Amino acid sequence: MIHLVLLSGGSGTRLWPLSNSSRSKQFLKVLRDADGKHVSMVQRVFGQIRNVHADLDVTIATCASQENSIRSQVDGDYALVLEPERRDTAPAIMLACANLALEQKADAGDTVVVMPIDTYADQAYYDGIMKLDAAVQGSFADLVLLGVEPTYPSEKYGYIVPTSSESDPRRVERFTEKPDEATAEKLIGQGALWNCGVFAFRLGYLTGLTAKYLTADDFEGFRSRYAELPKNSFDYEVVEKADSIGVVSYAGQWKDLGTWNTLTDEMADETAGRVVVDAKTCENVHVINELGLPMVVAGLKDAVIVATPDGVLVTGKEASANIKKQVAAAAESRPMYEERRWGEYRVIDSSVFPDGAKALTKELIVRDGKQLSYQRHAHRSEVWTIVSGTGEVVLDGLVQQVRAGSVVNIAAGTLHAGRSLGGNLHVIEVQQGDILAEEDIERFGDYWRA
Amino acid sequence: MIHLVLLSGGSGTRLWPLSNSSRSKQFLKVLRDADGKHVSMVQRVFGQIRNVHADLDVTIATCASQENSIRSQVDGDYALVLEPERRDTAPAIMLACANLALEQKADAGDTVVVMPIDTYADQAYYDGIMKLDAAVQGSFADLVLLGVEPTYPSEKYGYIVPTSSESDPRRVERFTEKPDEATAEKLIGQGALWNCGVFAFRLGYLTGLTAKYLTADDFEGFRSRYAELPKNSFDYEVVEKADSIGVVSYAGQWKDLGTWNTLTDEMADETAGRVVVDAKTCENVHVINELGLPMVVAGLKDAVIVATPDGVLVTGKEASANIKKQVAAAAESRPMYEERRWGEYRVIDSSVFPDGAKALTKELIVRDGKQLSYQRHAHRSEVWTIVSGTGEVVLDGLVQQVRAGSVVNIAAGTLHAGRSLGGNLHVIEVQQGDILAEEDIERFGDYWRA
C-alpha cells in the first residue's frame, strides 16, 4: 500500500501582499483547473493526485494556522497531522510517519511517498508516485528520490548525481548543492537531476530512524514530545546519512510558483478584481485588486500590481523576486485579511491617536450557520454594527437577536459570541483599546451546539 | 487702482484619484514654496501675487463647492464671489465685475485684471499685471491680453497674432485657435503669442457689455438673476467682439499642471505617504499614497502611482494624459474624500448586499471647536462610534457628552449634529439604507452658537 504525505509549510512573504502570515501561497485561488474553475495550488495538486489513483491514501502534515484553509479547500478523505510548532521538514515527516504507524495503523512494509504541496508540475510528475512505490517495494534502495531532468544549468538547485546513465531506477552516487554554472553544465552532462524534495521509503525505515530520538505508545504521546525531534531538514537528517539511495526521473514542467514572476506565468487571468487596464498601452501586466477601490492601469510593461487589505505592491516582473527587504520595511506586523473557521475578516481602517489610544475597524463575514467562539478580550472594547443578515449575539450569557441595523456594544472583559442564521452575517466592528492584537483573546469553545 | 479677479473653476478628473468632483487640482498640496513648505497651486499663486504688491486688491470668483477649500487655504484680505451655478467664464467674470461695481464700489475707470488661479508660471508672469494696468490706463486698447512667448509650435493652444513685432504693448490683428504644426510654426515666425486666458480692461468697459443682458441696483439682485447671463466663454463673448485689443508679452514658464505628467515635473517630493520605493530598480517614479495601507514599488521607470480613498492609479507618465475613458469607466460616482467646513471625511468601505441593502463606512474628523450642521437624512440610519476626542452630540434636541468609546445610534429621520470640544473628534460612521448619497441631507443651520 502507498501512503502519500503532503507537506504544507511556509507562509512566505514573497507573494506579499496576497500572502501574509496567515494566508500561504498554496491557498491563493489564482490558477485554473481543466474545467476553467479558479483553483489554488493545493486544489490543483489534489486533482492531479486523484488522477493517479482515486483512492490514494493521503496525509497532510501542516501547522495549526493552516488547518482552516485546508479544510475549506480540500474535500474528501485524508488525514491531517498538525505540527505543534514549526520545526523543519525532518520532524514534520517523522510526525506524519508516527501518525501513519500509531494512529492509522499502517504496516511497516508500506511505501511512504513525501511531496511538497506547493509544486506546479505536469500529471507525469504525480504518476511518478507509482514508479517510486515499485522501486521501494522492489527493495532497490532504502530511499528513492524523484529527480527532475534539468532544462538549463541552474545555480539555484540541488543536483542528484546517479552512478551511470542506465534506465530508471538508478543508484545515486552523490549530491551537489547549488553548483556554479560550469559545474552544473558538467553535472547535467553526467545525467544529473534536480532534487525536487520528493522522497519514498518503507514506513518502517523512517520509524526506525525516528526511534533514536523518540518512541511512544500512541500518537498523542508522540506528538506531545515533538520538541525532542531534531530541528533539521530531511535532506541533512535522513538523505545524507542513508546507505542506499535510488532515483527515478521525471521530465516535464516543474516550478516553484513562489515569486510573482513565476506565479503570473501560470495565472488563470491577467486581472482579478475591480480594475480597468488600458490594453492599448499595457503589455504583459498582471493585476490582482482585492480592495473595494476602483483601479486604473495604463502605459506599463512586464509588471505586476497587487492590492489587498495587507498593502499595495507595484513592481516590474524582473524586480519582483528581490523585494523581500522592501516588503519587510513596509508591511504591517499583523495580517489584514484572514480566513477563519467561521468565515473571514478584513481590516478596513486602523489609527493611532496622539494620546496613544488605538482604533481598528474590521468587516467580518460570518458564514451561514457558523459561529464565532465564545470569547473575551482584556484590552479592547468592540462595537458591532450589523449591516446585513440575521443572527444571534450573546453577551455574558444573554442572547439577543440581531439584524441589519442592530448595534452591539461589547466592553472589554465581556464574554461574547455571534452566529449567523439564514445567510451570511456582515458586521462592521470597531475595536478600541491600548492593545489591538489577534492574540488578545480568551476562548471558551462554542456557545451554541453545531 | 487695480482689481485682480482670480477664476477658480474646474474640478477635472484628469488628476484622478487625487482630484475628484469635490477636490480640484488647484487645492492639492503637492508643490513646495520658497521656504520648503508644501503648498497648493492656489497658495503658490497667492504668494506670487503678494510679491507683485502686498496690498493688491483680489476677488476670487468660484462656485460654492470650493468655498471651504479656499477659506482654509488662503488667509488675508480678499473678496469671494460665489457663482450660483456653473456656467462659463464670461458670466463668472461679469459676476465678479458686478461685485466690484455694486458691492465693493470700485470706480468704473479702475483696471480689472482677470487670471486663472491654476497656472504654474514664474514671478514675471504676475509682474505682467503692472504692464497690463499701464496699457489699460494709457487707453492703449479696450482689452489688453497677456501673451506667452511660445517655446514650440504647439497644436493645443490658441495664438494671439499681433500686427507687427514692435515692442509691448502691441496691437492684436487676429486669433488662431489650435493650428496645425506647420501653421503654428509660421505664426511663431510672425511673432504670435499663446493666449493664456489673462485679460485686462476698465471695469466700466465690462459692466457696459453686461448691461445688455442684465442690470441691477445691488449685487444680490444681480446675483439672483445669474441665469440670464450668456453661457459662453469670455473669449467668444467678449474678446472676439472687441473693437481694439492689445497684448503684452511674457517669456518664461507657463504650464497647466493638469496632467500627471506635467504635475509630477513640479512636485515637491517624489513620494508622499506610506511607501517604500526601491531606489536601485526605480527611475523617475512618483508616488502619492493617501491610503492607510503600506505600499512597495520596485522595477518601474517613468511612472506615476496615486492611491487615495477614491481609487488607485498606476500609469506610465506618457500614457497618463490619455486615461479619461478608463477613469470614467472605473471611478465611483461619489467622492470618497472631502474637505468640509467642519473637517474632513473619507469613505473606508462600501457594500451592496444581495437584497439591495447598502452599507457605507466613513471616518469623520471633526476639527477642534467645529460642528456638523443640524441635519437629518430621509433614507439612511447612521451609527457613530467615537474613537478619539471629546465633544457633544445632539439627537432631536437632546444633547449628550461623547468621548472615545461612545456609541450614538441615529435612526433615519432623526435630527442630529455633533461638535468637537478640546481637540479633534474622530468618528467611525456606519451608514445603512436604500440610498446612501451626500445629497440625502436636510440642513437646519448650526445647533450651537459659534
Image (tube, coloured by chain):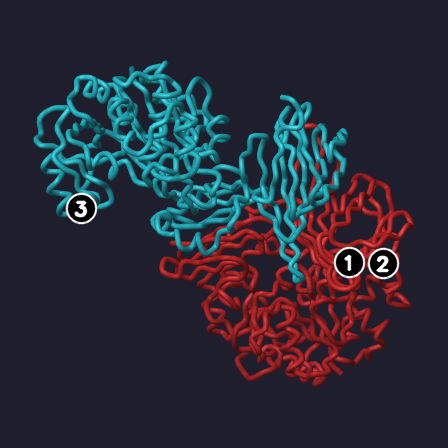
Chain colours: A red, B cyan
In-image side of A431 versus B228 (left or right): right
Numbered disc in front, either 1 or 2: 1
Q: To which residue does mark 2 refer?
A: A225
Q: Residue at x 63, y 40 (%)?
A: B363
Task: Where is residue A171? Give x, y as percent.
Answer: 61, 78
Give the SS element for disc 2. Answer: loop
CA separation in Å, label 2 and label 3: 84 Å
Of pointers 1 and 2, the one earlier in the residue sequence: 2
Identify the amino acid type marked 2: Arg
Q: Are marks 3 and 1 on the same chain?
A: no
Marks 1 and 2: CB-CB under 8 Å? Answer: no
User: Where A133 falls versus B242 (above or below)?
Assistant: below
Q: Secondary structure at mark 3?
A: loop
Q: Which kind of residue does numbered mark 1 sit on?
A: Thr
Determine the residue positioned at 77% across, 43% down.
A382
Mark 1, residue position: A390
Q: In the image, what residue type sits under mark 3?
A: Pro
